[in-house]
Amino acid sequence: MRRTLLATLVLGLLSACSFTVTVPLPDQEIPLNAPNTAGKVVYPKAGLSFERPPVQVQKVLLGGEAELSPFAPVSLDLYVRLEGNFEVAGCTPLGDLYYVCDVGQKDTYLGRIDLMAASSAPFTLGQQGGEALAQGVNNGRFWLGAKVGGVGSVGATLRLRNLKATATAGL
């Protein structure tokens, strides 16, 4: 009885050592309208830069509002990269501000945003790839890219607004 009570008390105290930190992130715009984007991830050349949280985080969920303009019914796969060395990774420049990349080892899949019925939708991703997001949040920088689900491309621009990283810190 005493051991069970002690174990419950210790577990309760350890769980109380975890807390949530919200990190606001800058909005991002990703063009998905170039013909060579079909089946590839489009990344902005400049990554998301932001103030690092005051503590190291272990797990991160990324949330915000996705908007596709003009509207096209699609699903979008989001990826994160921790490094911006796109030339070395074999990516192709798309104008001066973006790169188009095959999915590779440096790309971590975050999840899918469904815009099949409306031009905008709230999203929360990171159940997959949350560790890579945590590393990016701890560094104060990462690159967020999008790929049209399936093999097609769309004549539209993806805007990610009100982005925030909800991070768990502690044990």
Image: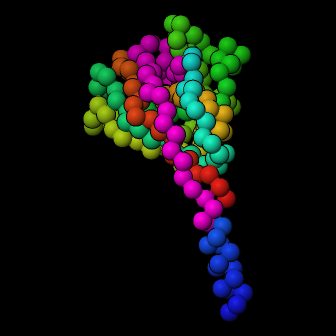
The answer to if 128 sits in the magenta stretch is: no
* Image location (x, y in percent) of residue 68: 34, 26
Residue 70 vs residue 75: left or right?
A: left
For the view shown, which residue lies furthest in the bottom direction? 1
Residue nearest the observer in this picture, 133 or 115: 133
Residue 115 vs residue 84: left or right?
A: left
Residue 5 vs residue 66: left or right?
A: right
* Image location (x, y in percent) of residue 140: 62, 32
**Position of 84 relative to 165 (above/below):** above
* Image location (x, y in percent) of residue 121: 33, 38
Q: Quadrant of the N terminus?
A: bottom right
**Position of 73 relative to 17 (above/below):** above
Residue segment shown in magenta = 15-44
- The residue lying at 56 percent from left, 30 percent from top is 50
Quadrant of residue 116 within the rendered picture: top left
- The residue lying at 65 percent from left, 21 percent from top is 84
Residue nearest the observer in this picture, 143 or 11: 11
Residue 102 vs residue 29: left or right?
A: right
Q: Quadrant of the C terminus?
A: bottom right
- The residue lying at 31 percent from left, 26 percent from top is 72
The answer to if 25 sits in the magenta stretch is: yes
**Position of 6 relative to 117 (above/below):** below
For the view shown, which residue lies furthest in the top direction? 95
* Image location (x, y in percent) of residue 138: 65, 38
